[in-house]
Image: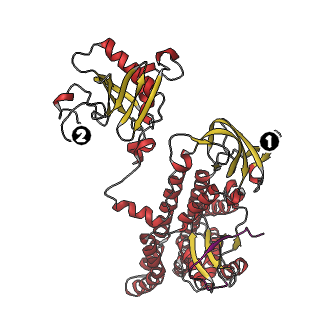
Amino acid sequence: MSEKTPLREASGDVEAGATEVARTKLRMANMCCESEATLARKTLDGLAGVVDVKVNVVGRVAYVKHRTSTISSAALCDALNGVKLGASVQAAAEKHDAAGDPPDLVEIGFVAFLVALFSAGLAVGGRPALLVVVALGALPLARDAARAASAGRLDVNVLMLVAVAGALQLGDAAEAATVCVVACLAKVAEAECLRRVRNALQDATAGDGADAATRPDGSTVDAAALKKGDVVVVRAGERVPVDGVVLFGKAAVDESALTGESEPVEKLKGSSVSRGTVATQGFVKVEATAARSEDGASELARLVDEAQATSTKTQDLIGRFAEIFTPFVLLCAIAVGCAVSVRVALVMLVLACPCALVLAAPIVVVASLGGAAKRGVLVKSAIALEQLAAVDLLCADKTGTITQGRCRVVAVASPPGVDDKTAARALQLAGSLEAVTAHPLAAAIVNEAVGCVGEADASALSDDVSSVVVTSGAGVAGVVDGVAVKAGTAAHCGLDLGTGDWAPGERGAAAWAPGERGATTIFVAVAGQIQLALAIVDPVRDEAPRAL
């Protein structure tokens, strides 16, 4: 299998003249539980030139940073294959992973045959049939035990084999067959569970399948085949297929999937665009600045993969516990067999299998990280995920993240002595003034004045707007239809509230103003007289409480 071009990065601890560090992804076909993951870490950590090792037991992959001048990717594979892990360099990961792992029908069929033969043996009391079940069922146990022994490990397969041998020694073929069938069923169930988790995570981090890109001549090409320097066109409603720079045109691009920014960002000639963002308006020609395998979206996918390969403190503790648990149980079983009975010792061996405990932690971690990635949340490591349990205070961006990013007026009020006609005129003047500004609150006032931008009669707003002055943090002032108009804070509009900021119910001079919870109150002054107040809110997203 050809090796994928490594990601090069500087490493501060590398000697001068050998500063190149490669990050290589290795697949291990024979890794099925945390004990193999621990073996892989120990094997790789002991090699000269290895800088860092992360192992994902669920994905059956390892991410290794190594000094290329000291050790190659092939040497890493040789070391892992020396302990029977079936390692190979992962190439074309995106295409390989997208297919998903199919169920192992041979293994499932083998176990189904064992169960059927076992049931028949019990039904008719056939000892020969049960002995055949023992002989066949012990084969995978012996295979895995031999593989572990060749690496200097004592695993749970040894416990099962000792239990089978003990049952046969007692002359109980049914008990021996039961242990074999249960052990084989457990192996198949474990493998199927991990397979489904792997496939679910691949679905979670896969793209939307929109891999076609359009060239300027109208022909289409697989976006995965694009390379640096290629030019594509992106129209309104299309997804940007590659990281690049705009050569021609103008478009509004929704970057919320990458940056969280709720409003589309204007892209002009020279602007950079990222794969996965969506053009909501306009048309642009884009020159690719990186191949798909090297762009920002691919790097994010790699970060998610590597985060799944990290481990929590709890997971490390369980792994260390499992290393000493198997020999400890074997010694205890020998003691129980001598002091109590062999049968009780055999029961203890069967019940003491730690696989479920050891697998519980990594499955939870990788499933959580994959689920978060599917929802647009990138967690940098398993430790960071574990530390969330101790979080007491959460800070988050509000506009466009917790809220919808689309402000609207929820209440309008006028001071005593201002009739409805005067208030409506003040709203029209304020809308005309705000229509020439770019503040987020301005759109809410314009919408309130005209009903809905783009659908109402354009004559509802005046075009006679001049002398516009925007004061940051205060408001806007200008002349509309020859009348001085101000919109903004109470102080900006000339409303004397004494010292401090206005708050509903606290200032008698503005007690008439709307006091909606969480709202921003904008006052409107016409010809120096306060005539209107509007309460503006950015509504909270319906899904925000659940997301937080």
Q: Which of the labelled discs sits on residue 484, or is there none?
A: none
Residue 257 magenta: no
Q: Residue at x 39, y 41 (%)?
A: 472
Q: Residue at x 55, y 47 (%)?
A: 257
| 347 relative position to 223: left or right | left
Residue at mark 2 to residue at mark 1: CA–CA distance:
56 Å
Up the image or down, 280 lies above or below 25; here it is above
- Residue receiving disc 1: 216
In this view, the residue in front, 55 or 482, is 482
Q: Amino acid at mark 1?
A: Pro
In this view, the residue in front, 136 or 45, is 45
- Across and down, in percent, residue 290 comes to 71, 57
- Across and down, in percent, residue 484 comes to 37, 24
Q: Is residue 375 visible?
A: no
Disc 2, SS: loop
| 289 relative position to 255: left or right | right
Q: Amino acid at mark 2?
A: Asp
In this view, the residue in front, 81 or 484, is 484
Magenta-highlighted stretch: main secondary structure?
loop
Callout 1: 10 Å neighbours few (<14), some, many (20+)?
A: few
- Residue receiving disc 2: 501
**Rendering colour mode:** secondary structure
Residue range corresponding to the magenta coloring: 2-17
State which quadrant residue 418 falls in: top left
Up the image or down, 179 lies above or below 154; here it is above
| 365 relative position to 285: left or right | left
- Across and down, in percent, residue 57 comes to 57, 68
